[in-house]
Image (spheres, grey):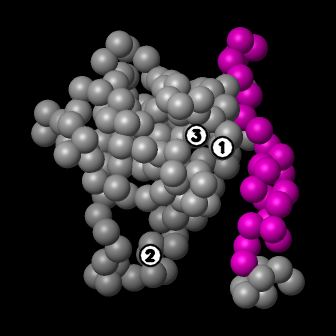
Amino acid sequence: MNQEMRLRFTYEVRTKAADLYDISTAGLNLLGNNQSYVYGYEKGGNEYILRISHSSHRSIEQIEAELNWIEYLAENGVAVSRPVLSCVGSRIETLEINQDKFIVVAYNKASGNPWSDTISQNEEFKLLGKLAGKMHSLTKRYEPLATQPKRFLWYDNDYLKAFTHNVPAMNPLFCQ
């Protein structure tokens, strides 16, 4: 995330986003800030993820399409991090602060363990391949309802279209 965008993610944004889910900002643990600010938090003995995205990165319709797809995967047996409702019962919340619009979504934290040397890489790759295959097969059959927004296709992703601009020139392997 560029510096100009980082400056927009103020303490006020974080506080108001946390308020939407009745959580304390002190309990937020920053996990990443590449394209969105992603935090981990605990509530009621359970672990969750809070994602705050700027509207210039994703539209509400794109995020709604993403959540519908995640629910479809879950309903078909894929272990995914499902969205969590806000205090007012919404899957998606928006904040407007200083002429900026932010989109806030919370998810159940995925269960699992950190990488371990006790499991061979071959075993891990087989499990990942099986999961990717299942997701691909389901996604090929996925048809959102006519009233639901549609996810963009992978080749319509603005970040992929501008790949050579977004990848540093000092990394020549990516630009060949």
Say above or below: 8 vs 90. Answer: below
Q: Is residue 24 visible?
A: yes
Whether residue 175 is in magenta: the answer is: no
The residue to which callout 2 is attached is: 123
State the separation of the CA atoms marked 3 and 2.
38 Å
Q: Nearer the viewer, mark 3 or mark 2?
A: 3
Question: Residue 110, image x and y in percent?
Answer: 35, 49
User: Looking at numbered disc 2 in the image, what kind of residue is underneath it?
Assistant: Glu
Q: If you read the primary sequence from the N terminus, does the residue marked by circle 2 or circle 1 appear first?
A: 1
Question: Residue 34, image x and y in percent?
Answer: 54, 59
Which picture quadrant has residue 101?
A: top right
Say above or below: 15 vs 130. Answer: above
User: Looking at numbered disc 1 in the image, what kind of residue is underneath it?
Assistant: His
The residue to which callout 3 is attached is: 54
Q: Which residues are magenta?
A: 144-168
User: Looking at numbered disc 3 in the image, what kind of residue is underneath it?
Assistant: His
Judged left or right of residue 101, residue 118 is: left
The disc placed on residue 57 is: 1
Circles 1 and 3, Cβ within 8 Å, touching? The answer is yes
Q: Quadrant of the N terminus?
A: bottom right
Q: Nearer the viewer, residue 172 or 142?
A: 172
Question: Residue 8, image x and y in percent?
Answer: 52, 45
Tag 3's secondary structure? strand
Q: If you read the primary sequence from the N terminus, does the residue marked by circle 3 or circle 2 appear first?
A: 3
